[in-house]
Amino acid sequence: MDPKGQKVKFNDGHFIPVLGFGTYAPPEVAKREALEFTPFAIEVGFRHIDCAHVYQNEEQIGQAIRSKIADGTVKREDIFCTSKLWCTSFRPELVRPALEKSLKNLQLDYVDLYIMHYPLALKPGEDILPTDENGKLVFDSVDFCHTWEALEKCKDAGLTKSIGVSNFNHKQLEKILNKPGLKYKPVCNQVECHPYLNQRKLLDFCKSHDIVLVAYSALGSQRVKGWVNLNHPILLEDPVLSAIAQKHKKTPALVALRYQIQRGVVVLAKGNNKEWIKENIQVMSGTVGRGFLRNILHEGHSLSDSQTAFGPRLVTCSFPEHECLVCIPGGFLLLLWQQERHHVWRGSQLDR
C-alpha cells in the first residue's frame, strides 16, 4: 500500500485505488444511473471506476469520464478504469476485439485493468445469454488459460495496463499460475466479499501469491424478492456492525467498507443515491480498531446476502472435464465454474 493508504500495488508494479465506484445497475436503469451518478462520484473524490461490457452502460460511463476530464475535474491519469471480458468472447481471437469495443464505448485509449468476468465461456455472438431452442444456456468449450494468453497480448499491446480475473476459486487461480509459459500473473481476483462472506481462505491464498482481492457486494446484495432470501439477516442491520459504528460515530456501511480496506482488500461501493456516494467516500478518513475488526471476523458467518451468493435459480451443467453451477436471477446471468467433478459448490463457498 502507498504511504497515504489510498492505493495498493499490483504484482506488475501498477497501483489500484483501494476504494472503487461500482457501476452495475439493472438493465432498465443502467444507462440512466451511469449518466447521473458516475460524474457525481468523480466530483466527490472517487477515482476508481469499475465497469463491464455486460453492464451495458460503458458508453454512458465513458461520457461521464470525458465530461469530468473536459471540465478540469480530473486528468485521464487520475482515473483508474476497470472493464471486464464477457463470457461470449473467451475464444482467444475474440478477446482483443472485445476489449477494443469497450475502449471505443468508454472513449479511452486504454483501461487500467481488464479482467475475465467469470471462469466459464458461453457461445460467441451478440446475445449476452445465448440459449438453445429449449431456453437453456449454450456454453463454449474454451480453456480459460488460452483466454488468459490473449489477455497477456492485450497488455503487451498497451490496451490495458493490468490483467486479472473475477469469481475464480483458488484451484482455478492455480490453473493459470501453473500454466506453462505464463507471462503475467493475475493482478487481482474480484469476488463477492463482505462480513457475512469474508473469503478469509481465498484472501490468504491470494495474498500468498501477491494477488489483490477486490470485493464486490461489500454492503450486501439488493433486497429484491427472487434474488435475495428475505429470511437472511440484513448486513447493514447486523448488531456487531451497528455497535462498532456507534462506537466510532460512523454508519454500518462505512464500518463494512473500512473492514475490507484494513484487511488489505480493495473494495467496490455502488451508489444510486448521492447521499450514499458522499458517505461512502468518507471511508478513506479514519480507521476502525483492530479489536473491533476481530469481532467482525469472529462472527463466523459464511453466508451471502442472497440465497447462494448468486441467487436461487440454479442449473447444473456438465462438460467432459468440469461442472458448472449456473444461476439466472431475474433474467440476468451469474455463474460459477469448478473443475472437480461430483462436487458442485455454491457461491458462498468461493473460499473453500
Image (tube, rainbow, N blue to C red):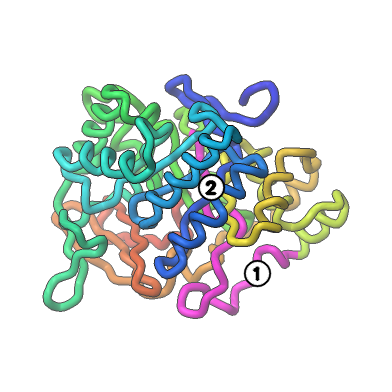
User: Are there few (<14), some (14-19), or many (20+) residues within 10 Å of tag 1?
Assistant: some
Q: Disc 2 to disc 1, how far (Cα)? A: 18 Å
**Residue 112 in the image: x percent, y percent?**
43, 32
Residue at image x 17%, y 39%? 92
Q: Which three-letter amino acid code belongs to the residue tagged 2?
A: Ala
User: Is 236 placed left or right of 164 in the picture?
Assistant: right
Residue at image x 44%, y 66%? 26
Q: Nearer the viewer, residue 264 or 223?
A: 223
Q: Nearer the viewer, residue 185 or 45?
A: 45
Q: Earlier in the sequence, mark 2 or mark 1?
A: 2
Asked if 39 appears above or below 125 in the picture, the reply is above
User: Is 257 placed left or right of 13 in the picture?
Assistant: right
Q: Nearer the viewer, residue 253 or 77?
A: 77
Residue identified by numbered label 2: 215
Q: Which three-letter amino acid code belongs to the residue tagged 1?
A: Ile
**Labelled disc at residue 203:** none
Residue identified by numbered label 1: 234
Quarter occupied by residue 172: top left
Query: Does residue 150 appear anywhere in the picture?
Result: yes
Q: Which residues are magenta?
A: 212-238
